[in-house]
Image: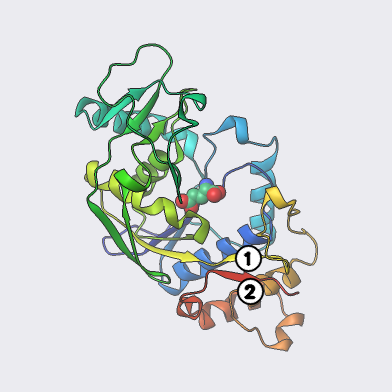
Amino acid sequence: MQTREPGRYIGRFAPSPSGPLHFGSLVTAVASYLQARANNGLWLLRIEDIDPPREQAGATDEILTALERYGFEWDGEIILQSASAAAHEAALSSLLARQLAYRCRCSRRDLVDAPRGELGIIYPGTCRNGTADGEAAIRLRTDNTEIAFDDLLQGRIVQHLESESGDFVIERRDGLIAYHLAVVVDDEVQGVTEIVRGIDLMDSTPRQIWLQRLLEYRTPRYAHIPVITHANGDKFSKLTGAPGIPLQRVEQTLLEAMTALDLRPPPELAQATLQDIWNWARENWLIGKLSGLKSIIKTA
Ligand code: GLU
């Protein structure tokens, strides 16, 4: 494995095994991979397997098989998020010990009348001052400090968490560590310097930056790439029935993913090997072409 010397770019792709890789997730993988390689960086592969109720049997193997077939070469071992449970728990304990987080017994039903904003329910703070016994979620306290970051592609993003999301869940009622906490801990532990991911996660970033601040972590750079949609505007996702990417004639699908990223492969690449396609893409990758784009229609 290449070394992680200071200053080195470290990127990652972090799929959840909730289904096979579909075209939209392939595009994200290609973008984060090319961005890491174009920066002479490392590209880590982390399987975010800490939400068993949402997982689909066999999905991890399907994802790995697809990534291999498409010629992705990750650095180091495959990282399973579930292996970092101790680090997640340590972060949670530290937040609780400093009273930056608290136990909350509110059920979904308790919150039906809560105000809603663009990020979903705005938690009204019901359990902020009480000690909740029994089964409870853990929420992180927020305030109205301005949380801002300059996304490489989407510009300046600003949120005020207390009024836009309210205190948010970092451990669920069922005892599972919530995505925001796990992703922040893992990116820190793994030394990730830049996160290239889909724009559907951009709204989550200020909550993750808030966690980074409270845990005294570094904040990586962020580049949120446009979502890939069908011609009717629906995004590729399991919910819209997006199928897994084909495992045959992968060159063609890879070129389609690159085209979606505005790479414009020359026609002769249609006959090229996977290796030649990747070499060409690495030379020609310019993430800036996606600046300001929120969605891209898959035409092919
Ligand atoms: N595991 C998340 C997903 O598959 C991605 C997490 C991230 O990139 O921050 O949607």
Residue 41 in the image: state x and y as whole percent: 41, 66
The residue at which mark 1 appears reads as: 228
Q: CA distance from mark 1 to mark 2?
A: 8 Å
Which residue does the image show at 68% across and 65% down from the upper left?
Answer: 233
Which residue has dot 2 on it? 260
Residue at disc 2, secondary structure: helix
221 sits to left or right of 83: left
Residue at image x 26%, y 27%?
96
Query: Whole-percent x and y of residue 200?
Result: 52, 56
Front in this rendered view, residue 40 or 86: 86
Residue at the image point whose x is 42% and y is 40% from the top: 115
Location of the C terminus (image quadrant): bottom right
63 lies above or below 174: below
Classify the position of the N terminus by image quarter. Answer: bottom left
Q: Amino acid at mark 1?
A: Ile
> For the residue with label 2, is its CB less than 8 Å from the closest atom of ligand 1?
no
Q: Amino acid at mark 2?
A: Ala
**x, y percent for residue 62:** 70, 47
Against 67, residue 189 (above or below) is: above
Return the residue nearer the eye: 117 or 241. 117
